[in-house]
Image: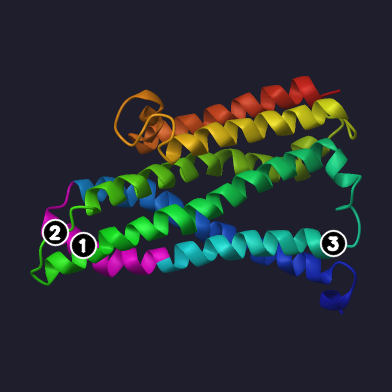
Amino acid sequence: MWLFNDYGFSDAFRVAHVISAVMWMGLLWFFNFVQVPAYAEMDAAVRNSALDKLTWRALWWFRWAAVATVGFGLLVIAVFPDGYDGDYFQSSRGIALLTAIVMALVMLYNVWMVIWPNQQVVIGNARNLIAGGEANPDAAAAARKAAMASRQNTIFSFPVLFLMVGAAHIFSTGDFDFDPGGTGWLFFLIGVAIVAVLEANALGYVSGTGNGGLNVIYETHKNAMYTGFGIIVVLYILAEILMGN
């Protein structure tokens, strides 16, 4: 029976990983490309109602889809009968996948440790206003923190998908060295450095939480998209230089 052979569990976990990722990325893009622009056009009462009824429910699926995506992805690696060993992660495709895993783990952190706690403040404030209470003075700052982390996750989502899909396609071709050695790890370190700088900025440690500076990448969903695609271009050029044949 397929499920119980050497590759069955790995394939099942892979399917679950992809389904979870579709849910996670789909909701992330919905929040950034649809919800945020729409909420900006609503009056306060309608927006508060939507936060209470729509955003609250969507965030449940969003945060648990993030857990499922990362969890099933790690299970794919853990149970794969061959290939995901020390040699695999010395290869160009393995290094690309490892770089993507780092980004995905940072994204998971943002969901649970930044976006969700701050959205609880925002939604709690909306519910309080609906009930006739006074506004929470911390709600605006919380909304900004959640928005910056969400936009940063949107930026990361594009290179994550590029690297994960590329690990099975682009980086598995003869155009890239199976064992790039030290230059492959240099690619990984540069990738991690890019992630670290952008994440520090999203948390307010580089340009604060106001407008201007590096925060321009968060000001519109288009800016976030352009930045994400720009990172893909940078990573591909680095891969050609450091891991290409």
Dominant SS of magenta comes to helix
Would you say residue 72 is visible in this rendering? yes
Residue sticking out furthest to the top: 241
Residue 47 located within the stretch drawn in magenta:
yes
Bounds of the magenta segment:
41-59
Answer few, some or many: residues within 10 Å of disc 3's Cα (few below 14, many 20 plus, some between 14 and 19): some
C-alpha separation, residue under disc 2 versus residue under disc 1: 6 Å
Label 2 to label 3: alpha-carbon separation: 52 Å
Place residue 173 in its image quadrant.
Answer: top right
Q: Residue 42: which numbered mark, if any?
A: none
In depth, the one of 152 and 80 nearer the eye is 152
Identify residue for label 2: 135
Q: Are marks 2 and 1 in contact (CB under 8 Å)?
A: yes
Residue at 13 percent across and 55 percent down: it is 44
x and y percent of residue 183 in the render? 82, 25
Label 1: which secondary element: helix
Left or right, 50 with reference to 240: left
Question: Mark 1 vs mark 3: which is more N-terminal?
Answer: 3
Callout count: 3
Tell me the kind of residue under disc 3. Answer: Phe
